[in-house]
Structure formats: C-alpha cells, structure tokens
Image (cartoon, helix red, strand yellow):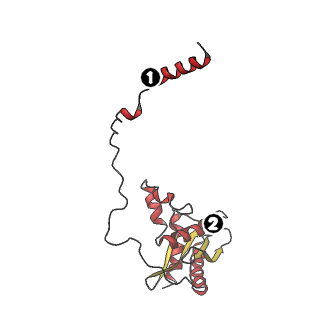
Amino acid sequence: MTPYTAHAAALCLALIGTPVLAQTAEPPKPAGPPQAPAGGTPEKIPFGLPYGAPITYEQAKTILAAAEAEAKKRGWPMNISVVDTHGELVHFARLDGAQLASIRISQNKARTAARWRRESRVFFNFYAAGSNYYGTLDPDLAASPGGIPLVADGKVIGAIGCSGGTGDQDALICQAGAEALK
C-alpha cells in the first residue's frame, strides 16, 4: 500500500466514524433562571430632572464656602468638589488634614451625582442590596454617599461631592453646601 493510499484509507475511516452534524438533533436547552427585573416599568423616568445651564463660578464659590464652614465647625477635614452638569470641576477645596485619596473620590462623587441626576448614595444602596449592574455602565461611578445634585429652578445645574469622613459625614457636608443654593 502506498503512503497516499494509507492516508486516504485513514481519512475514510475517520469520516465514517464521525457523526454528521447536520443530521443530529440538538438537545433541548434547560430552562435558565428567570431574568432579574431591570427596574420595572414606572410611568415616569426616575431621576428625570432636566439639566439646566451649568453652575456659575459664583454659585460654586457660595456652595463650597457653606460646605467648608460646616466641615470646619464639626472639625472634619474634607475634600469638597463642585462640578457642572457634565461633571467637570468648577471649584475645589482640600481642607487642612484631609486625606489625599479623597481628592479624586470627592470629584467622582460629584461627577456621579451630576451625570446621573441623583445622589451617589442611590448607587451605594444598589450595591449594598447585591446589584452591581450600574458599575458595568460607568467605570468612574462612585457608589458611596457624599455626592448630591445641585438643583435650581427644577433643573440640575451641577453637583457637590465630599470625601474624607464616613459616607454619612460626607453627605451631611454636601447637604450644607446644597442648601446654600436655595
């Protein structure tokens, strides 16, 4: 038998022993778990406040000054960021003794609150409940209390983010700043 014939014979045997895929039925797939709800179907879009004109520098200074005064009154060294509607920094303060890691965190909290038009605490609550879906949408999302949208005339004009204390301390200082806008 020539080498060519031996190879041909081996190929024929291999093909004969191989089932033809087009003629075999695909086994039924087992039913998977039900899909998790994706927020339901509310009548209105949640967190649907419209965006307004971006915060002005003068407004940002007023808000930051109020937040800074509250932080100093309580003796909490904070990083405080005020951003516009796009989440871009307008004004920032790092109080003496504030931890350096919190600089970027305060900016991310403010950015999250401005871009998503809701408190960053909302995402903290989602994560605490076991849902990490939102983290797949935005790598800069801050899922921690301490980011609050700034609203004027029913429109989001920016946000304030604070970091350096616990989440509740950060949120309290943000709230003091946000109230200065009213």
The answer to which quarter of the image holds residue 85 is bottom right
Q: How far apart are marks 1 and 2 (CA)?
A: 65 Å
Is 155 placed left or right of 163 in the picture?
left
Residues 30 and 119: in front is 30
> Closer to us: mark 1 or mark 2?
1
Dot 1, crowdedness within 10 Å: few (<14), some or many (≥20)?
A: few
**Where residue 32 appears, x then y in whole percent?**
35, 44
Q: Determine whether the residue tagged by mark 2 lies in a helix, strand or loop.
A: helix
**Where residue 19 appears, x then y in whole percent?**
41, 27
Residues 129 and 154: in front is 154
**Where residue 40 appears, x then y in whole percent?**
33, 62
The residue at the point 36 percent across, 53 percent down is 36
Mark 2 is on which residue type? Arg
Looking at the image, is mark 1 or mark 2 earlier in the sequence? 1
Is 154 placed left or right of 30 in the picture?
right
Q: Name the residue under label 1.
A: 16
Question: Is 58 placed above or below 89 here?
Answer: below
The residue at the point 57 percent across, 20 percent down is 7
Mark 1 is on which residue type? Ile
